[in-house]
Image (cartoon, rainbow, N blue to C red):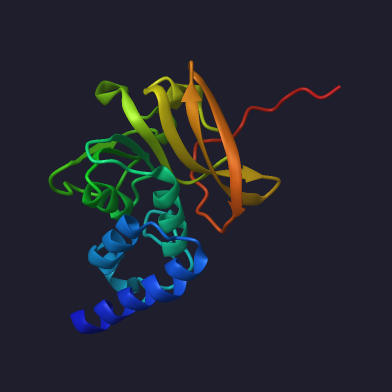
Amino acid sequence: MTDQNFSSMRTAMVESQLRTSDVDDQRVIAAMAHVPREDFVPVARRAMAYVDRPIPLENGRALNPPLVTGRLLKEAQVEEGDRVLLIGAATGYSAALLAELGAKVTAVEVGDGPQVLGAGVTVVRGPLAKGAADNAPYDLLFIDGAVEEVPAALVQQLVDGARVVTGIVERGVTRLCSGRVVSGVLGLASLADLEMVVLPGFSAPERFVF
C-alpha cells in the first residue's frame, strides 16, 4: 500500500463517511484529512485504516471507527489552547487530532499505548477511570469510547463549565453523548446510537432495586 493509496482512502473517508454523517465542522474535517490515520494502526492492519468499523489492537483494545472520532471531535467544539483530558488514548490517533486542532492534550492509557506524540500531547499511563489529576484542571473531557458511567474522579478534574464528550453504554447499546459540568455536576445528553469501542474499567456499581 503506497502513500498515494492512503491519501486517496483518507479523501474517501472524509467524503463518504464524515460529510454524509453529520460531521460538518470544517476544522474537524481538515484535521482528519491531514492526519494520516494509517500511522496509528498496527502494521498488519494498515490496509484497514479507513474502514468504518473498529480496528483490533494487539493489547485486546480496539481503535474507534473514523465516524465515531469525527462525531466526538465535532461535539467537543475544541478551541485553541483547550486543556484536554483524553481517556483511552489507544494508539494516539485522537490525541494527534486534538493537538492538530490546537489543544494541549493529556492522553491517558493503561499499559501499552502511544509513545511520545509530539508537541501538545503528554502521555500518562495508569487506570483510565482515574484520569490524570496532576495536570488538572481541564477544559474538555474527551472519552474515546463508551463507558457505563463517567466516574466522579474525572468530573472533579474539570473546570466549571467544562465540556464532556463520551459514549455511554445503555442496555448493550452504545450512544454518543455530550454535556457540560456545572457546579461540579455533569449533565449529558444522548445524541446518536453509534458503534463505539467499550473501554475497560468503567462498570457502573450495582444499584439495589426494591
Q: Is residue 150 depicted above or below 136 in this figure?
A: below
**Which of the 4 image quadrants contains residue 63?**
bottom left
- The x and y percentages for residue 25 are 38, 56
Q: Is residue 1 visible?
A: no
Q: Of 13 and 24, which appears nearest the observer?
A: 24
Query: Quadrant location of the N terminus?
Result: bottom left
Residue at far left of view = 119
Q: Is residue 61 left or right of residue 1?
A: right
Say if residue 72 shows up in the picture.
yes
On screen, 189 above or below 182? below
* Percent coordinates x, y for residue 162 in the rendering: 40, 28
Looking at the image, residue 128 lies above or below residue 32: above
Numbered-mark total: 0
Name the outermost residue toward the right.
Answer: 210
Foreground residue, 80 or 196? 80
Quarter of the picture holding the C terminus: top right
What residue sits 38% from the left and 54% below the top?
59
Name the residue: 43% across, 53% down: 61
166 or 116, nearer to the observer: 166
Residue 92 placement, left or right of 73: left
**Residue 52 percent coordinates (x, y):** 47, 70
Residue 77 in the image, given as x and y percentages of width and height: 38, 44
